Image: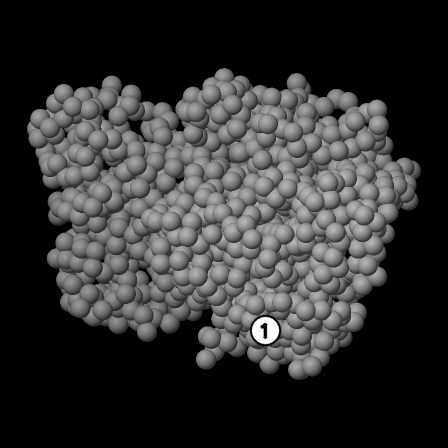
Amino acid sequence: MPMGHPYIPNVREIQTQMLREIGAASIDELFADIPSKIRLRRKLKLPNAMSELDVKRHVQTILAKNKPFTQMLSFLGGGVWPHHVPAHVRDLVRRSEFLTSYTPYQPEVSQGMLQSFFEYQSMICELTGMDAANASMYDWATSLGEAALMCARVTDGRKFIVPTLISPERFNTLQNYVSGPSLELVKIGYDRQTGQLDLSQLRKELGQGIAGVYVENPSYLGFLETQVDEIAKAAHEAGALFVVGVNPISLGLLKAPGDYGADIVIGEGQPLGNPMSFGGPLLGIFACRDDAKLVRQMPGRLVGMTTTPDGKTRGYAMVLQTREQHIRRERATSSICSNEALCAVAAAIYLASLGPRGLRELGEACAANANYAMRKLRAIKGLKVPIFNAPHFNEFTLNCDETGMSVAKLNAELLNQSIHGGKPLRDKFPELGETSLMCVTEFHTKEDIDHLVNALAEIVG
Amino acid sequence: MTSYRQARWVGEDGLEPLVFELGKPGRTGYTLPPKLHEQLNLPKHLIREKLELPELSEIEVVRHYTRLSQMNYGIDSGIYPLGSCTMKYNPKICEELASLDTAAHIHPYQSEETIQGALELMYKLERCLAEIAGVDRVCLHPSAGAHGEFTAMLLTRAYHKFRGDGVRTQVIVPDSAHGTNPASAAMAGYEVVTVPSDARGRVDLKALETAASERTAALMLTNPNTLGLFEDKILKIAKIIHDVGGLLFYDGANLNGILGKARPGDMGFDIVHFNLHKTFSTPHGGGGPGAGPVGVKDELEKFLPVPVIEHEEKRKFYYLNYDRPHSIGKVKAFYGNFGVLVKAYTYILLMGASGLREVSEAAVLNANYIMRKLLGTKGYELKFDAGGPCKHEVVFSAEPLKRETGVGARDVSKRLLDYGMHAPTYYFPPIVSEALMIEPTECEPREELDRFVGALKNIAEEARSNPEKLRSAPTATAIGRLDEVKASREPILSWKMYRKHRA
Amino acid sequence: MRKLGLIVNPIAGMGGRVGLKGTDGLEILAKARELGAEPVSPARAVEALQVLKRSNLKFDLITYPSEMGEEAAREAGLKARVIGKIKPRDTTAEDTKRAVKEMRELGVDLILIAGGDGTFSDAIDIVGTGVPLLGIPTGVKMHSAVFANTPQGAGGVAARFLSEGLPLREAEVMDIDEEAYRENRLSAKLKGYARVPYEPLMLQSTKEGSTSYELEDQKAIAREVAELMKEGRIYVLGPGTTTRAVAEEMGIHNSTLLGVDLILSRKLLARDVNEEQILRAIEGKPVVMVLSPIGRQGFILGRGNQQISPNIIRKVGKENVWIIATPHKLELTPILKVDTGDVRLDDEFRGYVRVITGYRQTRIVMVS
């Protein structure tokens, strides 16, 4: 008797019995309504089935051609960042009751997931200074797209303002999201010395019909946008919403955007308890103030607290999207269904483990490491670190124009010493010359940073 | 009949307390290496003063979330027959491989020579999916089904724009379509034209002919459709749309019903999307992460998002190609949910060519088995096409039961939870009243199917003799029915809002 | 405590069983009784009330004596407060009107009516849209859009309305030309509107469903039509609440509900016009007619509509007729009907048509 497949328990004998019971001659009969012209008569041109052991070896071999940052010193950031995830976070999130469940359509049997989402939403609100958050979007870039659409829905504005120094990946994604309702994107320039947003240009653009103003804080290039209070004020005076994009790791140390006027806060939740995983899965943060106009327009799934009908027992359930999102503004609807749910649960567990002090100390550690790196690197002749005279969090720019070497050459030399340099910026930001984006986290030790500094000093010198 | 009781942790106000209600000041579940002493130079007005997060030790965190997990149901708990969700077993070897350092700890911006493994795996996965669907090129970027649909709509727009055909403003969708279809089309700026289903539950061809015009950009179709029925006139449908110059988009949610038996590319579809978390068994994770790759025929290849993974034969080198002048750009940051892609690739290797075909055969047999066993049970009826076979899912209507006893699909579903089974999808698709949309997948043993059908029959009997049992169900779960109307009417969406509400 | 009114018109539906269409008029009623017709509506009312009883809801049931509700309530096992006075076995439209008036004065939240179009016609004569009404279907003569699909359905909707609340929509009440009806000709005229509770439709929007509300859907349709409108073109707006929403979208707040209005360049050109006025206005000008299905049968063009004659329809041309209907309307009337009196014209409209159902949303619907 041929062996059954581990994932298909109804072996041939059982299938034969089943067919008999339902009066079908063969399994082919069940597919007879597929027109013969389109029936696939050959085997799929795929490898034959492999045993678990063979697959394990095969995939491990392929993956072994990658150099993970646990084996190679790397200073890459710019959208995903390396942080240490406590072992128990990974363990808990892999519990199969969480892992193998789906969207909690039946709240009675899914309180575990629902309460975890509620806790995630709550912690995001505390971090960002908002009152309501959804149970996740795909990533920061798509959260930005959805935020622009939401601003258009709420204000009826047709224009959305972003900084010139916005992350190119996020800008590109945003362009696709606003293409449906044909919203116009306007870029605002920056001060060449400090990187800060050009407020006078902003004020000129803030006429009629602006749906929202967006800044990233810390910015894509690592510096803090210090004029956020003024930007918020200017946006609100023009009837626009103020949207802030964040790396939540910074929010243990830095002020919540809700405290400086943000209406919507978005960001990348990956560093909260999730590995970088080559850029996915990520975790789009999306939160807003408790304003009826805003909450009802928020895309994505929302979990709300309620009770049993007798009012005695607390429980959690998905809150149905209310009518407002369906009417009139179909130009700017959202279609998001499945999201990054499990990554959100990981973030909740991570934040619950760190607590306010842990997150603050983590932020301080990252900033301290970054400042140490900047201090040591700028001492190297020919390097300008950072290029902007402004406070930075844990990412910064490194310019090597004066060395006569390109970033590409620099990075190639570093790689020879098993060090991965920062992301080159010249192709997206040519005005910045030979500049790269460097990231330092709690993962890097003093020795690691010294190693980088020495290597660069040697290459450049 | 075995009995079932879900774990139930009870606190003061409800079940397990909120994490904010646990812990004590000073506790932590985290340790950090010693910090460097360095001037941070941060402006005072941007420094945080207070952060209200819970303070728990590691053991409290672990117990809290362990208890929560015990009050949650997954595929590993029991049957999960949600229609069009394909809740199949998630092989654990996939988890193991996706959490290797060489998969989890790589950065997307690493130079290509340091990520050849990732690029190779993704390239090979693209080729596998292309072969399975009968298309020419695949893009792995989209993070979910709806995201894939949105991407497909953007590709459609780019295609027509490239050909100078600007009048194509409409996308056609059947009235049985997945809800995300019209939403994704609307998101891309299209007008949505809905066509009715005929008495056989398939797209009404005459209505489709009326709908198709020079304004048609595309038709979005699931095949088998959401009733679990194969659109046997698909070649005619393709002709109607292609004749007016429109594109045919395949919603891959139901691919599990035809894996290895037929391919959307061969049916005439121009764009295809896949749900890796459905057909290819990556875990659903409570609602994600998933992946929704998109496959296209040659004419649309130039519009795919950047970057595209290329393979240089000579050097055996994989690289990311950004030089794509007609690309629609990006639909998200980076290249896709790699952590999910590893699992899907592993699954395809585990099943192999013959295994994937066995999957659809077993899935379709399981659904037909349920259909035949339940057919004729008083209280449930098939609205469409009771004569022919279904594919991997079947939609029953509990309308007769509702008329007879006053309890319908929702109450039946709630009572099913007391049997230790997850309910099927109910009230969807909207063209069947009191719908129960059942997809068992190939992973359910026959005994489980018998138990499921038996439970549905029992419940119909209970509805007649003791309807209160259904109306008060479930009682064996962690919590009973909740006031969901209240949840939507006065939304409390965070701990912050809860505190305000209580004050 | 919520108050529910119950009115049973014992005569409604009686003619059906013995092949008579309707029982208006004492002679017809007498004939029906001669033929052995038994009252039908009381039993239907009991079916609806039994659903309410099973719901275990607490409410104050107020009804009229003996066959106008008291008996039905007793049979369903519900305690009722009986008000008013009638002559048993000899009830008339006046009794219905009095019952409605008295129940309104007592502040009922909803009145369940087991009756036909005529009964509703009488009811809205008294309360218009002031008090929510809901029809328990009793058999023939249900051309108004105020009836639930089944008596049990009526009970279910009433129960939900009283407990968790339901939105209200305006539903057409039709007046049937009795003479024509008995001669097998259907000539239904829009008499007015009642306000009726309804269950919002579960939409395709997401798997767990977002819900669709009539009022919002009408606003969405109005926005779409407004965007499609061109300067210098005359728009003939047929009767109905959805076409009224179109007028409102343009800031016109005095359009007619039951009649036909003309709009030019987003302003009201003429109000409540007749056939002659329409012909004069559209002579030689580009024109579009915007119609909505009326009543339970889903007529977009019916004989009761005297203003929009076959002559006018021919002048406008089928390609310039826009049909608008909310998803709710189409739920109620999935197949639309035309009956202009001109058979060849009717034939032109038969088949599939596009119906505007929302903002940038249309549906292909069958016209038979």
- Residue B477 in picture, x, y percent from top left: 64, 66
- Residue B59 in picture, x, y percent from top left: 76, 75
Residue drawn at the location 18% of the way across and 21% of the way down: C315
What number of labels is visible? 1
- Residue B410 in picture, x, y percent from top left: 53, 56
Q: Does residue C202 appear in the picture of this structure?
A: no
Image quarter hosting the C terminus of chain C: top left
Count residues near mark 1 (Cα–Cα under 10 Å), then give few for <14, some for 14-19, many for 20+: many
Q: Nearer the viewer, residue B351 or B302?
A: B302
Name the image quarter holding residue B277: top right
Residue carrying label 1? B51
Residue drawn at the location 77% of the way across and 61% of the way down: A443
Q: Nearer the viewer, residue C161 or A81?
A: A81
Badge 1 marks a residue whose secondary structure is loop
Q: Nearer the viewer, residue B6 or B37?
A: B37
Q: Does residue A62 appear in the picture of this structure?
A: yes
Q: Nearer the viewer, residue C355 or A162?
A: A162
Q: Is residue A250 left or right of residue C110?
A: right
Image quarter hosting the N terminus of chain C: bottom left
Q: Amino acid at mark 1?
A: Leu
C107 is higher (above) or lower (below) than A390: below
Q: Is residue C201 left or right of residue C140?
A: right
Q: How is the image coloured?
A: one colour
- Residue A436 in picture, x, y percent from top left: 68, 47
Residue drawn at the location 81% of the way across and 38% of the way down: B113
Residue drawn at the location 88% of the way across and 41% of the way down: A61
Chain letter belonging to callout 1 = B
